[in-house]
Image: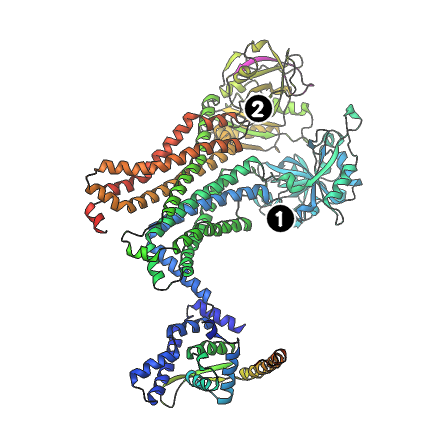
């Protein structure tokens, strides 16, 4: 259970923000499909796991959800990134870059 | 931060599941997935299943969603509490019993802690009391004494460690003006600067200036808030006006705030220099209670060192008084408050804790029993996935809910109890800061007690229950199989409860018996129609015996306008105390520590008015007490104690120090108690009133009818002698005796209520336990009935089992009583001591508790005899 929950805390939030920033407003299913394509390891992302992240982000005010109709005329909640979300994304990305750089230096040769 | 509030809101709103929204979103998600899978060629059914698989458990998803939306634990707590309240509401009998028992226990405990807190812990309401030191003179035996005026002045001039110095001499003043009857007001002489030292400022006007506090200075007074409101209607213009204090015109210069009544319920303050000149000028007249505030630089040790080195003993050289007295200092609260480590207070605390323990044992029993019948419910919940933690938590929530309800009930009980106790106190019985009120500290302790209860009683039962054997509990058809240890616990708790109950009940029974005994033997006054009132002759107004003699002569003169004679005068009323002084008998060698006897002065009409018969000799005559005819009357107890073999009328005695004159015994009176009810025997010596004219005089008359007319006649009589002199404590002798016994009455009420509460708790415990036990024996009883046991046998069976525990409990209790007795009863109080180890007494108590116990299990026994074997066995 623990394994599935999170590889690194905060990663999922960043991925979701990134996806919303590049793709525009998405519903949870759309996001999940998109992330399955991107992730190396689709099993990591049981689609249910997405929801806590969405709630968290919405509570932080980084994304905003609204009920809309899909092309297939289904009811769905579309999430779009907000201004403060964009700012947070930049900041977080920067942080991750630095961290990755540091980790790469600390763990040379280990892939 | 924003997220925190959103989560909190969600948690509190109980919308943590966000059930509507989450469910809708998850449904939408599933629908989209299904669409996708169908597009890939699956049948609708397959698609639906695949979609569910992909999404994972929807319950789990919703749960996690909930996790993110709100604080789970807050929400869980809410759920658990709601569950607990529902559970308690389902069994109101259990809940009521548990809350009643625990509430009583907590209430009694809170009352006791409030008393201890008020008397010992709270202390004076002054600024930084720890830095204020009370200073006393210690003689070579290290006995503390106050200081004389001269010593105070010298200390003030020489100390460097004490920045400000204060003092007080309590006084009773006659306050008069032209508006109302003169009033008797408690007050104090204090030097200038005392108010500032204590940190209090007047609400109107000012306090004494230095130049007012000097011999021959102006007559000024500061009033207390009570008298200002009651007598002067809170009128600020009183400042600057003149009133009469002890007949002397005095200017009011200020009014102190409400709640300031230093040193003890004082309601007016006069400059220390207004002390009668005789007091100021006599170096041996030590009556100034002195205290000082340390300077910022001083510490307790340095201040003590300085004081010990100061040599200010003003009696030095006079009388060749051995080694000189030195100064000692203690923090003022240590001096003015009793130590919590005294026997009385420890007994209080112990009794309170014992009652609480009984209550806890009771509720623990109730919980265990209830738990036993819930084994199956818990087993089922465990088997459908509740973790042990979850089950235990719910049980804890139940305990906590009970504790909270009981805590609230306890505070109510305590509030009512404290009101009742305060009502028993005569006015001014306790210093003003010792009011019996609950404060933050008391409530904190009560809260701690509730929490403690949850941990001590709730946690073990939760642990015990949550370990229930699932399979066994579900399959066994009996109403849950309770483990043996639990049953043993219930038995042990009940046993302990009875032991403690006996310990708590015995002092009450003893007290009642001793009390009745003393009343029978030493209360032989015919109180019918006896009216009492007091006058006080202030020392600065009636400084000499001669001035007092004039007053008394006029007081004893016929009252005009009515027939209230004869008038008895005394320095104390029966049961009203009186100084206890050392006794010497002529012709006997003086003991190293002479026995103490109560003394009071009475006039020639005293025995006549009181209708106390003289068994030998005669009453006082007008000449008794004059030089050359010094005389005394003793009571029968005195004769029994000191002169059993000889004719008292031919004996001379001396009371007081070696300077006192020898007195001829002229009469022996029937024993009437002088000291308040207590167990010590009370030998009394009566002295002729005129021999030592007292300042405080009780007037007693016997009137056949209503007291209003004689009261007003006597008031006018006194007013004719001195219009500025208040008459106070006007009441019947019956009321006066009742009031003087407040101390004993208070402790009696406390001891008796403990006993009643303990007994009540024991009854609750026994009722619950037997009821439950019978319930559990249903099958066995049914079998017995089926095999031919009659109602009598069944009854006997239940009683035997109950009494096995009762017997053990009471035996332990008898031993406990003796311990309690040794530990806490006053060694001098021999009657009470003997009472508590009196076998007849103990047997009586054991039997009565036994009888109460039988009553408590009657309902259960009745139910036991009515067990229908068919019904009982069919549940198998």
Which residue is located at x 61 percent, y 37 percent? Answer: B186
Rendered view: B31 above or below B455: below
Instruction: Tell me where residue B54 appears, x and y as whole percent.
Output: 38, 80
Q: Are marks 2 and 1 on the same chain?
A: yes
Boundaries of the magenta span = B654-669
Q: Can see residue B837?
A: yes
Given contact means CB atoms under 8 Å apart, are the residues at marks 2 and 1 in contact?
no
Which residue is located at x 45 percent, y 87 percent? Answer: A37
Disc 2 target residue: B570
Q: Residues within 10 Å of mark 2 (few under 14, many from 20)?
A: many
Subunit of label 1: B
Is B677 magenta? The answer is: no
Q: Secondary structure at mark 2?
A: strand
- Residue B293 occupies which quadrant of the picture? top right
Disc 1 target residue: B257
Q: Residues within 10 Å of mark 1 (few under 14, many from 20)?
A: some
Subunit of label 2: B
Instruction: Tell me where residue A99 appears, x and y as whole percent.
Output: 60, 79
Q: Secondary structure at mark 1?
A: loop
Which residue is located at x 44 percent, y 80 percent? Answer: A43
Instruction: Tell me where residue B572 appears, x and y as whole percent.
Output: 57, 26
Q: In this rendering, would B629 be left or right of B109?
A: right
């Amino acid at each position: 259970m623990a394994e599935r929950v999170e590889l690194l805390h905060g990663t999922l939030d960043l991925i979701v923000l990134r996806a919303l920033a590049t793709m525009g407003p998405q519903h949870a299913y759309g996001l999940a499909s998109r992330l399955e394509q991107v992730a190396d390891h689709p099993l990591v992302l049981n689609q249910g796991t997405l929801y806590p992240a969405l709630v968290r982000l919405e509570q932080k005010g980084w994304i905003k959800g609204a009920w809309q109709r899909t092309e297939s005329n289904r009811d769905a909640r579309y999430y779009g990134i907000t201004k403060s979300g964009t700012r947070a994304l930049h900041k977080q990305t920067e942080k991750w870059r630095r961290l990755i750089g540091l980790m790469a230096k600390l763990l040379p040769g280990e892939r | 931060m924003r997220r925190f509030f959103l989560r909190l809101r969600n948690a509190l709103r109980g919308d943590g599941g966000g059930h509507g929204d989450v469910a809708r979103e998850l449904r939408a998600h599933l629908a989209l997935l299904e669409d996708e899978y169908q597009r890939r060629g699956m049948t609708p059914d397959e698609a639906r299943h695949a979609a569910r698989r992909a999404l994972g458990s929807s319950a789990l998803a919703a749960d996690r969603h909930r996790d993110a939306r709100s604080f789970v634990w807050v929400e869980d707590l809410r759920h658990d509490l709601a569950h607990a309240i529902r559970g308690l509401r389902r069994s109101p009998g259990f809940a009521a019993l548990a809350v009643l028992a625990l509430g009583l226990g907590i209430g009694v405990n809170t009352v006791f802690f409030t008393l201890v807190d008020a008397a010992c812990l709270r202390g004076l309401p002054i600024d930084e009391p720890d830095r204020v030191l009370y200073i006393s003179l210690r003689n070579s035996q290290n006995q503390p004494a106050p200081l004389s005026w001269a010593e105070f002045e010298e200390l003030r001039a020489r100390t460097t460690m004490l920045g400000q110095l204060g003092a007080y001499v309590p006084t009773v003043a006659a306050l008069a003006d032209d508006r109302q009857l003169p009033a008797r007001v408690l007050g104090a002489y204090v030097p200038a600067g005392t108010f500032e030292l204590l940190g209090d400022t007047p609400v109107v006007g000012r306090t004494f200036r230095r130049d007012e506090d000097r011999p021959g200075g102006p007559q000024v007074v500061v009033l207390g808030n009570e008298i200002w409101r009651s007598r002067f209607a809170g009128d600020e213009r009183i400042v600057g006006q003149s009133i009469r204090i002890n007949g002397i015109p005095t200017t009011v210069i200020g009014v102190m705030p409400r709640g300031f009544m230093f040193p003890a319920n004082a309601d007016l303050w006069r400059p220390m220099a207004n002390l009668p000149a005789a007091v100021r000028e006599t170096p041996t007249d030590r009556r100034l209670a002195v205290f000082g505030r340390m300077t910022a630089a001083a510490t307790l040790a340095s201040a003590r060192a300085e004081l010990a080195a100061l040599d200010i003993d003003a009696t030095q050289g006079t009388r060749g008084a051995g080694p000189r007295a030195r100064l000692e200092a203690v923090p003022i609260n240590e001096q003015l408050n009793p130590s919590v480590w005294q026997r009385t207070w420890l007994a209080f605390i112990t009794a309170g804790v014992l009652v609480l323990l009984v209550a806890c044992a009771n509720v623990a029993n109730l919980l265990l029993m209830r738990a036993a019948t819930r084994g199956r419910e818990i087993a089922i919940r465990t088997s459908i996935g509740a973790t042990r933690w979850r089950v235990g938590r719910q049980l804890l929530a139940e305990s906590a809910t009970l504790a909270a309800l009981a805590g609230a009930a306890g505070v109510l009980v305590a509030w009512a109890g404290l009101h009742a106790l305060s009502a028993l106190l005569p006015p001014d019985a306790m210093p003003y800061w010792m009011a019996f009120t609950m404060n933050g500290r008391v409530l904190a302790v009560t809260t701690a007690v509730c929490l403690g209860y949850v941990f001590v009683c709730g946690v073990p039962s939760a642990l015990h229950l949550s370990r229930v054997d699932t399979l066994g509990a579900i399959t066994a058809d009996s109403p849950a199989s309770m483990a043996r240890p639990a049953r043993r616990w219930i038995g042990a708790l009940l046993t302990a409860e009875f032991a403690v109950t006996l310990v708590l009940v015995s002092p009450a029974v003893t007290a009642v018996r001793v009390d009745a005994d003393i009343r029978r033997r030493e209360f032989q006054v015919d109180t019918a129609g006896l009216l009492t009132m007091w006058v006080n002759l202030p020392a600065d107004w009636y400084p000499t015996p001669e001035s007092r003699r004039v007053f008394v002569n006029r007081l004893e003169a016929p009252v005009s306008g009515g027939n209230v004679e004869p008038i008895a005068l005394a320095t104390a009323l029966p049961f009203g105390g009186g100084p206890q002084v050392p006794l010497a008998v002529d012709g006997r060698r003086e003991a190293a520590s002479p026995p103490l006897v109560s003394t009071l002065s009475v006039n020639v009409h005293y025995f006549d008015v009181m209708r106390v018969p003289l068994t030998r000799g005669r009453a006082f005559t007008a000449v008794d007490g004059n030089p050359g005819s010094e005389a005394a009357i003793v009571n029968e107890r005195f004769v029994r104690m000191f002169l059993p073999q000889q004719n008292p009328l031919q004996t001379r005695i001396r009371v007081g120090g070696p300077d006192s004159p020898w007195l001829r015994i002229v009469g022996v009176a029937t024993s009437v108690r002088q000291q308040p009810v207590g167990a010590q025997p009370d030998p009394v010596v009566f002295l002729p009133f005129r021999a030592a004219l007292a300042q405080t005089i009780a007037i007693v008359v016997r009137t056949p009818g209503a007291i209003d007319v004689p009261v007003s006649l006597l008031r006018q009589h006194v007013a004719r002698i001195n219009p500025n002199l208040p008459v106070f404590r006007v009441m019947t002798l019956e009321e006066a005796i009742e009031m003087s016994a407040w101390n004993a009455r208070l402790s009696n009420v406390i001891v008796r209520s403990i006993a009643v509460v303990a007994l009540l708790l024991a009854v609750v415990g026994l009722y619950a336990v037997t009821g439950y036990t019978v319930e559990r024996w249903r099958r066995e009883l049914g079998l017995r009935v089926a095999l031919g046991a009659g109602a009598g046998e069944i009854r006997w069976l239940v009683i035997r089992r109950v009494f096995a525990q009762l017997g053990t409990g009471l035996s332990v209790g008898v031993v406990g009583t003796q311990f309690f007795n040794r530990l806490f009863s006053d060694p001098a109080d021999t009657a009470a001591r003997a009472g508590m180890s009196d076998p007849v007494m103990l047997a009586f108590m054991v039997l009565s508790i036994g009888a109460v116990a039988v009553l408590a299990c009657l309902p259960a026994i009745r139910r036991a005899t009515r067990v229908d074997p068919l019904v009982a066995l069919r549940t198998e």
